[in-house]
Image: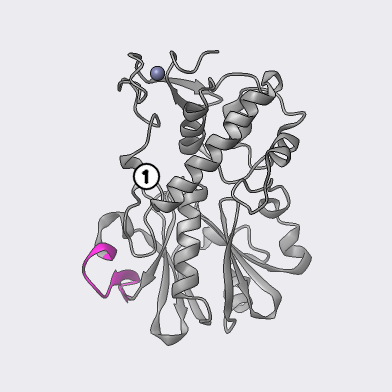
Amino acid sequence: MPELPEVQTIVGDLNKKVRGLAITGVWTDWPNAFRRSPGGWKNFEPSVKGRKIEKVRRLGKNIIFDLSGGEKMLIHQKMTGHLLIGRWRLDKNRPVPEEQGLLSEKVNGYIHTLFYLSGGKMMAFSDLRKFGKIIAAGGEKFSDLEDVKNIGPDLTAAGFSFFDFKKALAGRRGPIKKVLMDQSVVSGIGNIYSDEILFVARIHPLKKTENLSDVELRKIFSAAKKILKKAIKLRGTSISDYRDTAGKAGGYDKVRLVYRKEGAPCPDKCGGKVRRIKIGGRSAHFCPHCQKL
Ligand SMILES: [Zn+2]
């Protein structure tokens, strides 16, 4: 699933490519993606059509489009969703890319929604698993959305300090990996980066949050800042379906430390091997020698 660095990469791309353009129409063959939008698919196109994209920003793992007239569009890419900019034509109600290259690769070919934009550009949502969601809402309807009101602070926000981090984690109990991935505690971290952050901090993923010392919390905080910054610079991780808006893979997976590296030697060359365990249905990867419980 795209996490903070992947979503940040897409948001950066979109601000360069579609900011200032108007949405002139929407096509879909998967109305279910709009089920959480007030009024569903039926109401979606009338809500966004003719509106200008004033700005694109990130809220946790959500992409928010600020549209003219106070309307907002929220896209959550979920497991396999990603946004692409290019041109497609419909052939028997199936989108076909107008150009060869990255956009015609299979991973970018599961397009179920197309946004027609002014200036002849198009924005496509490719989503193999079809878990992604697209919502249009304005005013209170927007701020009342579950995806918006329960979002915790952003670790990469300017001025977000260790004190803010400690405050966000205060009163939270249970395995630190699970707490870091809880979007209402801090936003944007998922399975990939929680493993990477905890390895750099040398903290066992099962260590109880309530038992962490200030020194340990500080290690996690600085590891998180470092890893997220590095992953944004490398334009994210593409082990799964994530691609940028040109259909191109990110570069972080080539330098990743422990995520999905079960059995590989510890990146710190301690002699140990990366292990995988399950925590609440999710996999955690760590070095049992460097990250002691
Ligand atoms: Zn190790």
Q: Position of residue 190 (x, y in %)?
A: 52, 39
Instruction: Identify whether 145 is placed above or below 140.
Output: above
**Quadrant of residue 166 in the image?**
top right
Please tell me which residue lies in front, 106 or 237. 237
Q: Residue at x 32, y 59 (%)?
A: 108
For this view, does 241 lie left or right of residue 193? Answer: left
- Magenta stretch: give its range: 88-103
Q: Residue at x 52, y 76 (%)?
A: 19
Amino acid marked by disc 1: Tyr
Q: Position of residue 149 (x, y in %)?
A: 73, 52
What residue did someone put label 1 on?
Answer: 252
Residue 97 is covered by the magenta coloring = yes
The quadrant the C terminus occupies is: top right
Instruction: Identify whether 161 is placed above or below 126.
Output: above
Please tell me which residue lies in front, 254 or 240. 254
Per the image, label 1 sits on a secondary structure element best described as helix
